[in-house]
Image (cartoon, rainbow, N blue to C red):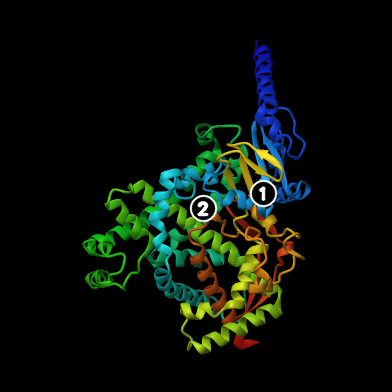
């Protein structure tokens, strides 16, 4: 009996395989080159292995079948693209803004936040959050970036002399601090132990995300919840959600103590904000993203759950991706002494001209440092992958890709395409001089995605990175302990170098 059932099951799978691969859609997909495809399982073997092996295999497949390839994950076709013309076709068209199934691993953590929502809900979320990152608000944030940079410098100076740091945990701590004070309007001074628990939980959640994504073809969310890793994820989510719920509760308490005056005057009146500070005896609190969400909830535009989901999203995206990017930036400067010295000279001159006041004006003067950051993001972009669903039939590289097909965009390979980037592995900040940018394909460089669904916080991230790097370079010489070419690059929610250590040598001692 068992054998009959098994044979019947295999027969059904083979019939499904024939229908999917040799139907109209399957025939179109199979015209596109790609790795060997087996019956039923397709090319799913490509996703098997450790996170380091997965990273290397993705690079190999992308290079071998440049500029477009297909992979069958059981009965689901996935198309990989990396030519700027194709990126422009997809990313610039609002019909292709829907995120793919690969983002489903975020749902237990962030729900249907702006990261993965679609349609009217996504437009509403974008409208609510966009004012957080306008120029006037970012000017206020610069003060906090400066303060957190000073805390970072102080922590290094307290070590008295040369100190070696593993960059990933070091930068994560300080980007999280800055994010909470800017986007959330609270300080983490009283949440030290919870902060460390949160950072560890984020990293483990990333590891589970890869595990779950590679196996989501095999079981449902309900089945995953019963596995040991499913139960571990539940414990981690309790930490992550508990941390953000505490942050939201503290900010709501502030508005209760100020009778909501601040929320009524978000746009241009600071009097309520100042009065509120007097009422509770604290420093003046600047506009925060969280305030916009709380205000929206009072108007019936968001629920408490939706607030938490948006906070969970910005907490992850706002600190982890920036921290990973800073790791690569600092390591590259450590490995290239002449470029580091040129950055230091620019920073020192700007500080003298601004009388050591690290303001928005100061940051705008650091044009060479900005080119270094852009070049580092080209070489090592933390958000290495974008995935979309074709909203309609679309022609890519002479192949017709049917509506509903999953698309993968490998950002790091786009950024290292020798057809658009001569000597792509060389760290050369002058690639971003105005005259060299002018004739370059606009979609050959997309560190923050592009089009209507680009990163809403990209200006925030650039300002924070400029401030932190400038402060470190002014106070310390950077020397490599580990070289990027030798470190393990692990794929989880973002690309993390592990470990990547830099030696900080006080400037006055050298």
Point 69% across, 28% down: residue: 21
The extreme top residue here reads 1
Q: Is residue 62 left or right of residue 382?
A: right
Point 31% across, 65% down: residue: 267
Point out residue 136 in the picture as x, y percentages from the top left corner. Answer: 39, 71
Point out residue 154 in the picture as x, y percentages from the top left corner. Answer: 50, 78
Q: Nearer the viewer, residue 476 or 389?
A: 389
Q: Nearer the viewer, residue 172 or 424?
A: 424
**What kind of element bears circle 1?**
helix
Q: Nearer the viewer, residue 15 or 418?
A: 418
Point out residue 67 in the picture as x, y percentages from the top left corner. Answer: 73, 49
Observer-side mark, 2 or 1, equals 2
Point out residue 238 in the picture as x, y percentages from the top left corner. Answer: 43, 47
Residue topped by disc 2: 453
Please rate how many residues cluster around mark 1, counting C-alpha atoms within 10 Å: few if below 14, some from 14 to 19, many from 20: some
Q: Are marks 2 and 1 in contact (CB under 8 Å)?
A: no
Residue topped by disc 1: 51
Point 43% across, 58% down: residue: 194
Q: Which mark is residue 488?
A: none
| Quadrant position of residue 377 | bottom right
Up-down relation of residue 175 to residue 299 (above or below)? below
Q: Taking the image as drawn, is residue 48 in sight?
A: no
Choose the circle earlier in sequence order: 2 or 1. 1
**What kind of element bears circle 2?**
helix
Up-down relation of residue 446 to residue 406 (above or below)? below
Q: Taking the image as drawn, is residue 79 in sight?
A: yes
Point out the image quarter for the N terminus.
Answer: top right
- Tell me the CA gap for discs 2 and 1: 27 Å
């Amino acid at each position: 009996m068992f054998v009959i059932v098994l044979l019947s099951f295999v027969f059904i799978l083979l019939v499904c395989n024939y229908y999917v691969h040799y139907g109209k859609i399957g025939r179109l997909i199979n015209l596109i080159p790609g790795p060997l495809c087996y019956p039923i399982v397709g090319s799913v073997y490509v996703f098997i292995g450790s996170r380091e092996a997965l990273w290397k295999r993705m690079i190999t497949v992308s290079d071998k079948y440049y500029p477009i390839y297909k992979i069958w994950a059981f009965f689901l076709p996935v198309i990989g693209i990396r030519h700027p013309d194709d990126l422009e076709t997809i990313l610039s068209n609002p019909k292709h803004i829907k995120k793919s199934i690969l983002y489903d691993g975020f749902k237990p953590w962030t729900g249907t936040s702006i990261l993965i929502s679609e349609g009217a809900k996504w437009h509403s979320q974008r409208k609510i959050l966009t004012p957080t990152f306008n120029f006037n608000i970012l000017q206020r944030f610069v003060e906090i970036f400066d303060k957190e940079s000073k805390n970072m410098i102080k922590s290094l100076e307290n070590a008295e002399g040369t100190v070696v740091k593993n960059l990933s945990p070091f930068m994560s701590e300080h980007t999280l601090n800055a994010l909470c004070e800017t986007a959330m309007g609270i300080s983490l001074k009283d949440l030290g132990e919870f902060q460390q628990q949160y950072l560890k939980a984020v990293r483990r959640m990333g590891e589970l995300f890869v595990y779950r994504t590679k196996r989501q073809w095999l079981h449902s969310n309900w089945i995953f919840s019963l596995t040991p890793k499913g139960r571990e994820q539940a414990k981690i989510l309790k930490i992550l959600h508990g941390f953000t719920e505490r942050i939201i509760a503290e900010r709501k308490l502030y508005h209760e103590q100020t009778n909501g005056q601040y929320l009524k005057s978000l746009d241009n009146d600071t009097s309520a904000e100042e009065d509120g500070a007097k009422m509770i005896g604290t420093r003046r609190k600047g506009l925060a993203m969280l305030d916009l969400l709380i205000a929206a909830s009072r108007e019936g535009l968001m629920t408490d759950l939706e607030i938490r989901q948006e906070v969970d999203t910005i907490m992850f995206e706002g600190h982890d991706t920036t921290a990973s990017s800073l790791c690569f930036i600092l390591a590259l400067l450590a490995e290239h002494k002449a470029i580091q010295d040129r950055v230091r000279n620019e920073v020192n001159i700007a500080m003298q001209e601004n009388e050591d006041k690290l303001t928005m004006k100061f940051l705008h003067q650091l044009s060479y440092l900005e080119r270094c950051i852009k070049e580092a993001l080209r070489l090592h972009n933390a958000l290495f992958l974008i995935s979309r669903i074709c909203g309609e039939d679309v022609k890519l590289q002479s192949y017709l890709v049917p509506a509903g097909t999953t698309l993968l965009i490998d950002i790091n390979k786009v950024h290292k395409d020798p057809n658009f980037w001569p000597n792509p592995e060389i760290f050369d900040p002058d690639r971003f001089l105005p005259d060299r940018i002018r004739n370059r394909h606009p979609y050959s460089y997309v560190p923050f995605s592009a089009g209507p669904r680009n990163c809403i916080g990209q200006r925030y991230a650039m300002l924070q990175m400029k401030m932190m790097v400038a402060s470190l370079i002014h106070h310390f010489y950077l020397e490599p302990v580990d070289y990027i070419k030798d470190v393990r690059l692990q794929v989880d929610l973002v690309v993390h170098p592990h470990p990547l250590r830099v030696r900080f040598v006080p400037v006055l001692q050298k």
